[in-house]
Image: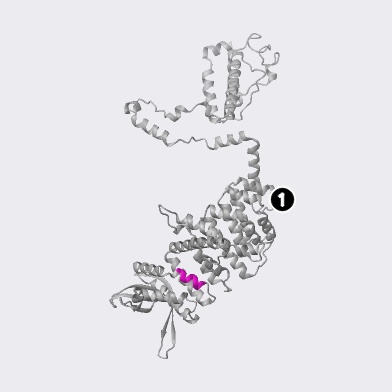
Amino acid sequence: MTDTRRRVKVYTLNEDRQWDDRGTGHVSSGYVERLKGMSLLVRAESDGSLLLESKINPNTAYQKQQEDEKFLTDLFAQLTDEATDEEKRQELVNFLKEFCAFSQTLQPQNRDAFFKTLSNMGILPALEVILGMDDTQVRSAATDIFSYLVEYNPSMVREFVMQEAQQNDDVSKKLTEQKITNKDILLINLIIEHMICDTDPELGGAVQLMGLLRTLVDPENMLATANKTEKTEFLGFFYKHCMHVLTAPLLANTTEDKPSKDDFQTAQLLALVLELLTFCVEHHTYHIKNYIINKDILRRVLVLMASKHAFLALCALRFKRKIIGLKDEFYNRYIMKSFLFEPVVKAFLNNGSRYNLMNSAIIEMFEFIRVEDIKSLTAHVIENYWKALEDVDYVQTFKGLKLRFEQQRERQDNPKLDSMRSILRNHRYRRDARTLEDEEEMWFNTDEDDMEDGEAVVSPSDKTKNDDDIMDPISKFMERKKLKESEEKEVLLKTNLSGRQSPSFKLSLSSGTKTSLTSQSPATNLPGSPGSPGSPGSPGSPGSVPKSTSQTAAITTKGGLVGLVDYPDDDEDDDEDEDKDDTPPLAKKAKFES
């Protein structure tokens, strides 16, 4: 069963010839076994009960009217004829509206044939005439008919308005030569004007028309063929002939630093315009970008941040947030050149410490700039508005922006530091597809015997890497490290040979070294002191150093060195092993004691 989900109101005629309200329901069509054919069904919106059931006969007046081209031709002729009575025209428009509404219950192939017939009969030119009339009821019915056409096939409507614009351009050229002004109005501009001039306090008609315009300018439902691109052609037409009509109320109301009219209905209308412009920023590319920058639209929009209506100020902020979200440097330069953060900062400060949607939306915009690291906007905000924002401490957003700014300055002042950080951060080499293919080919070409022998396969990318890939700071660091290691080795060698430390070498003691391995103090090594080699109480002749003394000194020096990472347990094990190795044999020990 095909469910169109069309919402309708059902009335039935009672015995007193009065209409009874049966309720609101949804229209659907499907095959009903009891009626032996396709039927029109209306089920209640509340409980799904059946409100109406009617069989659709093949030979209905609807089918005959669709096939009768003379009937449709007469219908459109009477609609567009200026001599037609207003009451008669209203009846014809309402009939055509019901005609289109009933077509929603048809099968897709029948509905396609119906709208093609209407298009061939000239329904769009007829609607253009009807929309230009003063009768509001007739215009409202014509708007409903136009919505059926846009929902069915927006490309058909686009093609008509572009052909109309081309014809008007040709006529305008001829009239310009004759010095006559062409006052023809395009169909889509009529729709925009009706949206702007809606008298409904709730702007119900304007909301409907804005949705139709959004469908027409949506690139997602535009066709692209080999010969032409509908998106490029229609958007070029729209920004040339229609965008100035759409932005007219915005430009008229933002000539000063605050909105000239700030009543509720005007605010609602401008919110609708901003919603459509925000949609264009998101889905259109260079068309809307050129228009915003050339017409200074963003500055005009930010004037609405001073509106007393919070929803309008939020619409203006959302428009700017959408632009910043694109991270386009053309937009960023335009924002910085015109100092377009000033209205936002003013609104933030005027809002004070109130925790509301305005406060959160503004903070979120600055947080996006910080997280995405948009360098140009970060520098612009800190350089121009930091004094106004530095006292905001209930969030870390602005202090984070300040930190980002200082890091940028540091990298600019010391480019080598920036390159060093990037190397350490991106220490993995990126290999292209060709290198990977070469490695795979080499792996498959390698014999299994070679692999079993333990020969490693070296990739071409690893062979080509040389010392030139290492940056200057890293090479200097490695040279200093090697020099330091060589000096330590020389000191150890001298200590082992002479039995005492070099005066120029300062021995650093680790906390994990045992007390028995601690080097002697300088006082104990002086001649004449107790325990010194030259003292009378010391064994051996003056100037001679026992072998155990030199070994102890070597152990002391080695145990006193502190590496980059200290492993106390391992050091103790090593020291114990060295003690075992350096312990003299029993014969030598006895000789020393004697």
Residue at left 48%, top 58%?
234
Image vertical order of residue 575 relative to residue 301, above or below: above
Q: Nearer the viewer, residue 559 or 491?
A: 491
Q: Nearer the viewer, residue 111 or 184?
A: 184
Residue 442 x, y percent position in the rendering? 37, 30
> Callout 1: few (<14), some (14-19), or many (20+) C-alpha neighbours within 10 Å?
few
| SS assignment at label 1 | helix
The residue at which mark 1 appears reads as 387
Does residue 97 appear in the picture of this structure?
Answer: no
Residue at left 61%, top 54%?
294
Considering every residue shown, the one lying at the far bottom of the view is 16
Displayed quadrant of residue 317:
bottom right
Image vertical order of residue 282 relative to residue 201, above or below: above
Highlighted range, magenta: 124-131
Please say whether residue 129 is one of the residues in the magenta stretch.
yes
Considering every residue shown, the one lying at the far top of the view is 541
Displayed quadrant of residue 17:
bottom left
The quarter of the image holding the N terminus is bottom left
Instruction: Tell me the amino acid under the disc marked 1.
Output: Lys
| Dominant secondary structure of the residues highlighted in magenta in the image | helix
Q: Nearer the viewer, residue 391 or 91?
A: 91
Is 224 positioned to the left or the right of 553 in the image?
A: left
Residue 323 x, y percent position in the rendering? 58, 54
